[in-house]
Image (spheres, helix red, strand yellow):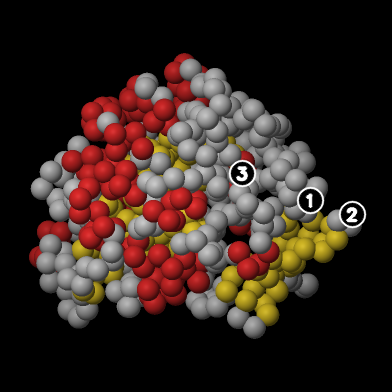
Amino acid sequence: MEQANPNETESLCPVCLKRIKATRLLRGDEVFLIKECGEHGVFETVIWRGEPSMVEWKRAKKPVHPELCYGPVDKGCPFDCGLCAAHEQMPCSVLLEVTDRCNLHCAFCFADSSSRKAEDPTLEKISWLLERAMAAAGSCNLQLSGGEPTLRNDLPEIVEIARRIGYCFIQLNTNGIRLAADKDYAKQLQGAGLSSVFLQFDGVDDEIYRTLRGRSLLDQKLQAIRNSGEVGLGVVLVPTLVKGVNIDAIGAIVRCALQLSPAVRGVHFQPVSYFGRHPELNGDAGRFTLPELMRCLEEQTEGLIKVKDFSPPGGEHEHCSCHASYVLSSEGKLRAIGAANNDGCCSVVPGSDGIKKTVENVSRRWKLLSPAPSFNLPQPSANKACCSGNNPDIKRAEGPLDLDDFLREVASRSFTLSAMAFQDADNLDLERLRGCCISVISSDGRLIPFCACNLTSRDGKNLYLTRNGSMAR
């Protein structure tokens, strides 16, 4: 019997967004996605560089298909998202954009947000959308996003609505400007039931922020962390990684995050993808892949973080992300837990089991158990010292584990590193897309995989969204 080539997949033409065949091809230690459109020619993009190799980076999962679908299978993937019955994973997170407005104009922006006065969805519409998502996705995690969600004064009411509907872990995607300026607003959000802050945090010096965000922001970022921690909101730092801008800052970001632990619960890296708003694609020279990130972490932290600490994901497709979990003791000892071959979900299990574990892990590790007035958070005058990366007291813990110490500290002093390699029209792999577990709640109540929802052609045509944010399909 003839067997399918595991290196063959499907993608889209980055010019016309037509579905076309694609092949993953290994050249030396790099893997390329190669595809040809009959009208627009051949395209190839690097998708993996070096060790750990792409073939080794695996976690077998049995596909699970959505039971309640808001989109019929008609044109085929990726044109029927709703999710449709052909999708092979349930959502671990759903993302709701509560506004298109923003108080920054970043060089890189997934949502292509702006300062224009767009009409925000009403509380009634938001309630309907969240109920639709809950019916289809179940009790998954919720991210409130935008635009900049904190521009809404009624954001605490939105959090309360989500709680009433049944969302147990609610996270805010934010640039942190309002949280830095208004501690009472942070307290209102925490009191309403917000679980965690997903804070844009691209580096440890203002030159990076001036390049990526258009202004100096470091003091405000650190004040947002202080204000959030002191009212009981855990913070996850979220750097957008751009070659030539902040790749050299990866290690310093981690060391800064560790110094701000346990208020900072971890770092979630996002290598830049070319959709939304971005400068012109700089070919393969601008690509930064997951294995490169893992190696940079080991090199730039001088072995405090190691490549061997990282595991493939239990929820989404194995080539979409990586994660590593740690406990940072009160004595400043960092211990890796749950390494790649000992993470508890490496066997071939239904995808729904991996999703349940992902939801539980995120909720447990990214929450802050109590307000943190006693945590060693820097005052603005100490920001430079905090972000210098010069914290030699933090050492890697090796050797036998003291179980009593571990049990005492794991709940409150966990620390997580993770990364998500989002796809754009050039490197889109439909096999990966069908395994996506992060869905955007569309304005008409469907669930659209994140990379499909934001996907744009080279001339800016969006696969799903129109210019004003409504659904095109």
The residue identified by callout 2 is 39
The kind of residue on which mark 1 rests is Val
The kind of residue on which mark 3 rests is Gly
Decide: marks 2, 1 in contact (CB < 8 A)? yes
Which residue sits at x=76%, y=38%?
74
Q: Quadrant of the N terminus?
A: bottom right
Residue 398 at x, y percent in the picture? 22, 78
Which residue sits at x=44%, y=75%?
295
The residue identified by callout 3 is 276
| Residue 466 horizontal side relative to residue 417, left or right | right
Q: CA distance from mark 3 to mark 1?
A: 15 Å
Residue 338: mark:
none
Residue 339 at x, y percent in the picture? 35, 71
Q: Earlier in the sequence, mark 2 or mark 1?
A: 1
Residue 15: mark:
1
Image quadrant of residue 450?
Answer: top right
Instruction: Answer above or below: position of 21 versus 133.
Output: below
Q: Toward the viewer: 55 or 300?
A: 300
Q: CA distance from mark 2 to mark 1?
A: 9 Å
Residue 178 at x, y percent in the picture? 34, 33
Which residue sits at x=12%, y=67%?
331
Q: Quadrant of the C terminus?
A: top right
Which residue sits at x=28%, y=53%?
265
| Residue 45 horizontal side relative to residue 249, left or right | right
Q: Earlier in the sequence, mark 2 or mark 3?
A: 2
Residue 432 at x, y percent in the picture? 61, 57
